[in-house]
Image (tube, rainbow, N blue to C red):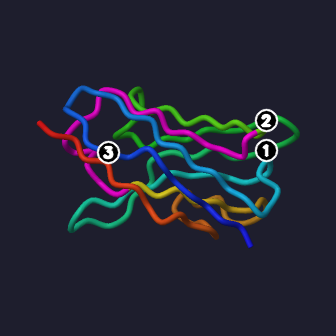
Amino acid sequence: QVQVVESGGGLVQAGGSLRLSCSASGGTFTTFTMGWLRQAPGKEREFVASTRWSDRTIYYRSYADSVKGRFTISRDNAKNTVYLQMNSLKPDDTAVYYCAARRPGRTLDNTQYEYWGQGTQVTVSS
Protein backbone atom coordinates (compact mmCIF):
# COMPACT_ATOMS: atom_id res chain seq x y z
CA GLN A 1 0.00 0.00 0.00
CA VAL A 2 1.31 3.44 -0.94
CA GLN A 3 1.55 5.95 1.87
CA VAL A 4 1.75 9.68 1.25
CA VAL A 5 2.80 12.15 3.94
CA GLU A 6 3.02 15.94 3.60
CA SER A 7 4.87 18.45 5.74
CA GLY A 8 5.90 22.08 5.71
CA GLY A 9 2.70 24.04 6.04
CA GLY A 10 2.35 27.03 8.31
CA LEU A 11 1.53 30.69 8.64
CA VAL A 12 3.24 33.24 6.43
CA GLN A 13 2.68 36.87 5.51
CA ALA A 14 1.60 37.87 2.03
CA GLY A 15 4.58 38.03 -0.28
CA GLY A 16 6.43 35.37 1.68
CA SER A 17 7.49 31.85 0.78
CA LEU A 18 6.95 28.31 2.00
CA ARG A 19 8.15 24.94 0.82
CA LEU A 20 5.96 21.90 1.19
CA SER A 21 7.41 18.41 1.15
CA CYS A 22 5.73 15.11 0.43
CA SER A 23 7.15 11.63 0.74
CA ALA A 24 5.59 8.55 -0.82
CA SER A 25 6.46 5.01 0.16
CA GLY A 26 5.29 1.57 -0.82
CA GLY A 27 5.54 1.80 -4.58
CA THR A 28 7.73 2.69 -7.53
CA PHE A 29 8.06 6.39 -6.83
CA THR A 30 10.02 7.16 -9.97
CA THR A 31 7.01 6.31 -12.13
CA PHE A 32 4.34 8.00 -10.02
CA THR A 33 2.56 11.11 -11.08
CA MET A 34 2.74 13.30 -8.00
CA GLY A 35 0.34 16.15 -7.54
CA TRP A 36 -0.43 18.97 -5.19
CA LEU A 37 -4.01 20.05 -4.73
CA ARG A 38 -5.62 22.44 -2.29
CA GLN A 39 -8.94 23.11 -0.69
CA ALA A 40 -9.91 26.45 0.77
CA PRO A 41 -12.79 26.81 3.24
CA GLY A 42 -16.13 26.60 1.47
CA LYS A 43 -14.54 25.74 -1.86
CA GLU A 44 -13.96 22.59 -3.84
CA ARG A 45 -10.57 20.99 -3.96
CA GLU A 46 -8.53 22.28 -6.89
CA PHE A 47 -5.42 21.27 -8.77
CA VAL A 48 -2.23 23.20 -8.04
CA ALA A 49 0.70 21.40 -9.69
CA SER A 50 1.86 17.98 -10.81
CA THR A 51 4.91 16.15 -12.06
CA ARG A 52 4.18 13.23 -14.38
CA TRP A 53 6.58 10.54 -15.43
CA SER A 54 6.74 10.03 -19.16
CA ASP A 55 9.69 7.86 -20.07
CA ARG A 56 12.99 6.98 -18.37
CA THR A 57 13.95 10.26 -16.73
CA ILE A 58 11.47 12.53 -18.51
CA TYR A 59 8.90 14.25 -16.35
CA TYR A 60 6.25 16.76 -17.34
CA ARG A 61 5.23 19.50 -14.97
CA SER A 62 1.85 21.18 -14.97
CA TYR A 63 0.53 24.15 -13.04
CA ALA A 64 -2.77 25.80 -12.39
CA ASP A 65 -2.95 29.24 -13.98
CA SER A 66 -3.37 30.83 -10.57
CA VAL A 67 0.07 29.69 -9.41
CA LYS A 68 2.15 29.82 -12.60
CA GLY A 69 5.29 31.85 -12.10
CA ARG A 70 4.98 31.69 -8.32
CA PHE A 71 4.98 27.99 -7.44
CA THR A 72 7.46 25.33 -8.52
CA ILE A 73 7.04 21.59 -8.21
CA SER A 74 10.11 19.39 -8.10
CA ARG A 75 10.99 15.86 -7.10
CA ASP A 76 13.94 14.01 -5.65
CA ASN A 77 13.53 10.40 -6.66
CA ALA A 78 16.44 9.29 -4.49
CA LYS A 79 14.44 10.49 -1.48
CA ASN A 80 10.99 9.51 -2.78
CA THR A 81 10.00 13.09 -2.17
CA VAL A 82 8.22 15.82 -4.09
CA TYR A 83 8.35 19.49 -3.18
CA LEU A 84 6.19 22.52 -3.76
CA GLN A 85 8.09 25.78 -3.51
CA MET A 86 5.60 28.59 -3.05
CA ASN A 87 6.77 32.16 -3.54
CA SER A 88 4.95 35.49 -3.58
CA LEU A 89 2.17 33.99 -1.54
CA LYS A 90 -1.20 35.67 -1.47
CA PRO A 91 -4.09 35.44 1.01
CA ASP A 92 -6.02 33.57 -1.71
CA ASP A 93 -3.45 30.77 -1.45
CA THR A 94 -4.73 29.96 2.04
CA ALA A 95 -5.94 26.37 2.01
CA VAL A 96 -5.25 22.85 3.11
CA TYR A 97 -2.70 21.50 0.66
CA TYR A 98 -2.83 17.83 -0.26
CA CYS A 99 -0.17 15.72 -1.86
CA ALA A 100 -1.36 12.82 -3.98
CA ALA A 101 0.10 10.01 -6.05
CA ARG A 102 -1.01 8.07 -9.07
CA ARG A 103 0.54 5.06 -10.77
CA PRO A 104 1.33 5.27 -14.50
CA GLY A 105 -1.24 4.15 -17.04
CA ARG A 106 -4.16 5.65 -15.17
CA THR A 107 -6.02 8.80 -16.07
CA LEU A 108 -4.21 11.98 -17.10
CA ASP A 109 -6.78 14.04 -15.20
CA ASN A 110 -4.80 16.26 -12.83
CA THR A 111 -7.51 16.03 -10.18
CA GLN A 112 -7.67 12.23 -10.05
CA TYR A 113 -5.23 10.34 -7.83
CA GLU A 114 -5.11 6.98 -6.12
CA TYR A 115 -3.29 7.82 -2.94
CA TRP A 116 -3.65 10.89 -0.76
CA GLY A 117 -1.89 12.48 2.15
CA GLN A 118 -3.65 13.90 5.16
CA GLY A 119 -3.13 17.51 4.13
CA THR A 120 -1.16 20.39 5.56
CA GLN A 121 -2.54 23.84 6.36
CA VAL A 122 -1.10 26.90 4.65
CA THR A 123 -2.32 30.26 5.91
CA VAL A 124 -1.28 33.51 4.26
CA SER A 125 -2.01 36.66 6.21
CA SER A 126 -2.54 40.03 4.57
At mark 1, the secondary structure is strand
Question: Sequence-wise, which precedes: disc 3 or disc 2?
Answer: 3
Q: Quadrant of the N terminus?
A: bottom right
**Percent of width and height locating residue 120:** 40, 55
Identify the residue at image location x=75%, y=46%.
Answer: 53
Q: Residues within 10 Å of mark 1 (few under 14, many from 20)?
A: few
92 in magenta: yes
Task: Give residue 54's mark.
Answer: 1
Report the amino acid beneath label 1.
Ser
For the magenta stretch, what is the residue range? 79-96
How many C-alpha atoms fall within 10 Å of the one at disc 2: few (<14), some, or many (≥20)? few
Callout 1 touching callout 3 (CB < 8 Å): no
**Marks 2 and 1 close (CB-CB < 8 Å):** yes
Determine which residue is flagged by label 3.
Answer: 10
In this view, 34 is above or below 117: above
Taking the spot 34% from the left edge, 29% from the top edge, the residue there is 17
Residue that badge 2 annotates? 58
